[in-house]
Image (cartoon, rainbow, N blue to C red):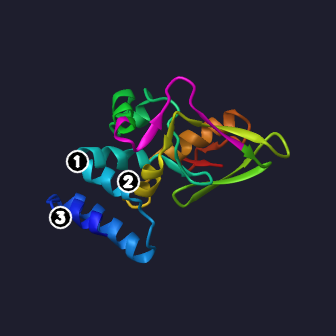
Amino acid sequence: ITNFFDKSRLISDQDMQRLWANVLAGEANMPGSFSKRTVNLLADLDKKDAELFTALCSFAWSIGGMAPLIFDAKHEIYNKMGLGFSTLSHLDSLGLIVFNSITGYIKMGLPEQVALYYFDRPVVLNMPQKADNELQIGCVLLTKAGEDLATICGANPVDGFFEYVYDKWAVAGLVPKREVDTDRGGMNS
């Protein structure tokens, strides 16, 4: 608590004050939920860093923990939100994420059916084997501090991202392909 108040007392920006208030509320509700390292990292963030991290968390799915699904840092869906190779490298250097643009990351040991969520939208993947399946989850992982801050950063879903990821999984045969509903101009899955 002393470390928290020492670090937070000089924050004047309203958005950053809200983030600090969320950390304090989280600690009050569940003591020990934010490590000293997370508090120190938050103290080093400026508003632009926090906004970039919030943008990244807008792409996070719940896959046994939060995982930002960044498949191609050059894709327009990410670039529209200010994310690309340099900004992801910057978030990596801050200690919020681990960024590997070469090989990416795989979630291993998955069962035959896996329920995943993009904010409140669920998808059930039908994996090829009864057990020990693998799923490509992109080139970004959250660090422990990143996981802590992702829960309070105030991210919102990105329009079209659910469909973008769903289509990737449909091509891989993990979910049924969506059909275009031409009468209503929408998509059905």
Q: Is residue 139 above or below residue 117?
A: above
The residue located at (27%, 68%) in the rendering is 2
Q: Nearer the viewer, mark 3 or mark 1?
A: 3
Percent x, y for residue 44?
26, 48
Q: Which residues are magenta?
A: 93-108
**Depth check: 7 or 130 in front?**
7
> In the picture, residue 29 is in which quadrant?
bottom left
Q: Is residue 69 left or right of residue 64?
A: left
On the image, numbered disc 3 is attached to which residue? 9
Q: Is residue 94 magenta?
A: yes
> In the picture, residue 24 is in which quadrant?
bottom left
On the image, numbered disc 1 is attached to which residue? 46
Decide which of tag 2 and tag 1 comes sooner along the chain. Answer: 2
Amino acid type of disc 3?
A: Arg
| SS assignment at label 1 | loop
| Dots 2, 1 in contact, CB < 8 A | no
Q: Nearer the viewer, mark 3 or mark 2?
A: 2
On the image, numbered disc 2 is attached to which residue? 37
Decide which of tag 3 and tag 2 comes sooner along the chain. Answer: 3
Amino acid type of disc 2?
A: Arg
Which mark, by number, is residue 136? none
